[in-house]
Amino acid sequence: MDPPESLPEAIQSLIKTYADLNPSTITELTSEPSPLEFMRYVAQNRPFVVRGGARDWPAARKWDAEYLERVMGDQEVNVAITPLGNADSVTLDHGNNCTYFVKPLERTEPFNKVLSYIRRQELEDLPGVIKYAQTQNDNLPNEYAPLTPDVPPSIPFARIALEQPSPDALNLWIGNSRSVTALHKDGYENIYVQIAGEKHFVLLPPSEAACVNETRVRGATYVHSSVNGKEEDGSDRAEVQEGHEEKRVEDENKVERMISLDIQPDEPEEYIPFPTWDPDIPAKNATPYSHLSKPMRVSLQPGDMLYLPALWYVIPSPIPSLTTPYPRIQILILEQVSQSVAVDQPRRHLRSRELLVRLHLLSPV
């Protein structure tokens, strides 16, 4: 009788066996699966892409920065503010040489000002803090209610298969290319739908959990450090003469860029488990098993759908393009017990436009 495997040997065997028994690429379909076919993928916990599965979504015909600003106007929205675009990520505080899972500074601002700041920072390559509308509190039917007619309430094959008639929450996220996304996992099913432009995804199966160096990291939040030209709450000190709207906007954007942020550890202490290894930087924060990881990569073209199963690790990132001389726009719809939409506008040198829609279709497992 063979001696039992040690724990490290068993973990290595799990990672290798999964890789040996499953495809190293993502299945591509040319049409939407039936509800039964979709449930088979859910049961197998395997991703797939439907090429051209969402070409006719209404948002694909309408949503660009100008349309969003015209429809939303000066409606108040929640915005996350960070120094590097790194909301909800593991960050080193150079002041005390400690690492934290840092949440953004949040405040409410008129939508048109938020969008103007995001666009100008991209198009003019301006320095300063990064703004990102990213709340997950059912903000689309509330903060962004005028946009709801443009977003389908569900994807039929998933709605029928999962017997979930409507999402529990619907959220809109708006940011630019400086808003980065770290390797992470979701405890629910996801369907990403690309509307325009391209998006690249790096995927790792749950069997590679030992590779990603998931660590309990103390929670913290970005707070105002010193604010030049602003009150503590971020309101303006500078007086602008009536009728000088262009100068006022320029002054406001300049003041915003001067905001300084510090990392403040949360009290009481809370520790969040989060991956600290990046498959694209394999030597940093590696575990003894990281070298066994077999990341899968896929790029979405306009109208493509990507099903991402629960507990898979993912890093989404934009693809540079010179074919469309406009800022990239992303829409993200998710349903987790909530649903969410994200709009991102990238750097000027990418010179592309993109819309991304993601639906999270199950409650957390």
Image (tube, grey):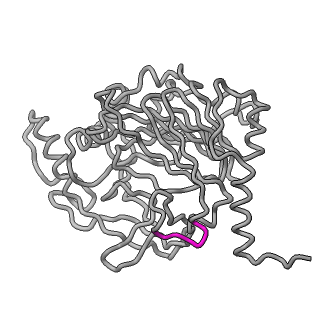
**363 and 279: which is toward the camera:** 279
Q: In this view, does 77 lie to the left or right of 113?
A: right
**What quarter of the picture does the C terminus occupy?**
bottom right
Q: Is residue 241 above or below residue 274?
A: above
Residue farthest along the right direction in this orientation: 1
The percent position of residue 317, horizontal first and vertical second, equals 44, 45
**216 and 251: which is toward the camera:** 216
The percent position of residue 31, horizontal first and vertical second, equals 66, 24
Residue sitting at 46 percent across and 57 percent down?
A: 280
Q: Can residue 178 be seen in this view?
A: yes
Q: Is residue 219 above or below residue 122?
A: below
Residue farthest along the left direction in this orientation: 241
Q: In this view, does 119 lie to the left or right of 294?
A: left
**286 and 147: which is toward the camera:** 286
Q: Is residue 337 visible?
A: no
- Look at the image and say whether residue 289 sits in the magenta stretch: yes
Magenta-drawn segment: 284-290
The percent position of residue 245, horizontal first and vertical second, equals 13, 35
Q: Magenta region's main secondary structure?
A: loop
**148 and 239: which is toward the camera:** 148
Q: Is residue 53 left or right of residue 79?
A: right
Q: Where, by quadrant of the figure, is residue 205 drawn?
A: bottom right
- Look at the image and say whether residue 127 sits in the magenta stretch: no
